[in-house]
Image: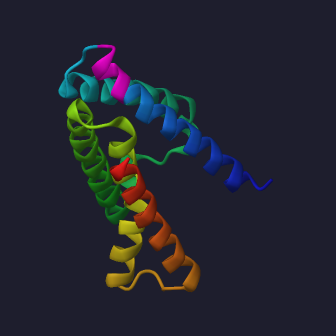
Amino acid sequence: MDSWLTSSLLSLLLYALWAVSSKQSQTMGKLSPIESQVTTVLTMFVLSLTTVYTNRDAIRAPNDLPILGVSLAIAAGLLTYTAGTFYSSALTTGSGSVVAAISGSYPAVAFVINVAVGWESVSGWKLAGLACAVASTACFSMA
């Protein structure tokens, strides 16, 4: 199995476990959405510092990093944090599987955005994937 596929499958499993543990931190664990989000972010921060430390020889000095790359990475971080905040809020009253299905359909939305701005081309398989994503989200939302 190709390494990208192995990593993708592990990511899928870990995201599913993340969705379950996020919901349970609020229901069983009695955390508020903001407490859950802050705890998650702090955990990621500690893990990020560990990653930086263990890979310090492979990371360029801040003044050697390209401004566009850093700007886009900062935007990605802000968007991820904001999305996580809304996700945690939705879990407060929403079904975990429905919230995960709706928010997890972001690849289909990213595809549409990328096509709209000309960064990605349309193919039959991608359109089929888009249709399946919409159908999957609809099925989970109606259950």
Give x and y (percent) for residue 143.
38, 47
**Residue 100, image quadrant:** top left
Q: Which residues are magenta?
A: 23-29
- 98 up-or-down from 120: above or below: above
Q: Position of residue 6 (x, y in %)?
A: 70, 48
Q: Say whether residue 118 is magenta.
A: no
Q: Is residue 59 left or right of residue 3?
A: left
Residue 119 image position (x, y, % from top left): 41, 81
Task: Specify the quadrant of the image occupied by residue 24.
Answer: top left
Q: Estimate the x, y position of residue 74 in percent, counting from the top left.
A: 29, 51
Q: Residue at x 48, y 85 (%)?
A: 121
Image height of 41 relative to 129, above or below? above
Q: In screen coordinates, is 109 left or right of 53?
A: left
Can I make out residue 81 in this image? yes
What coloring was used for the rendering?
Answer: rainbow
In the figure, 116 relative to 110: above or below?
below
- Compared across the picture, whether 141 is left or right of 14 comes to left
Q: Magenta segment, principal secondary structure? A: helix
Q: Residue at x 42, y 26 (%)?
A: 21
Number of marks in the rendered image: 0
Towards the viewer: 88 or 76: 88
Q: Residue placed at 34% from the left, 52% from the top?
A: 142
Q: Quadrant of residue 28?
A: top left
Q: Residue at horizontal 33%, vertical 20%?
A: 25
Q: Is residue 117 visible?
A: no
Foreground of the two, 73 or 10:
10
Residue 107's place in the image compared with 34, above or below, is below
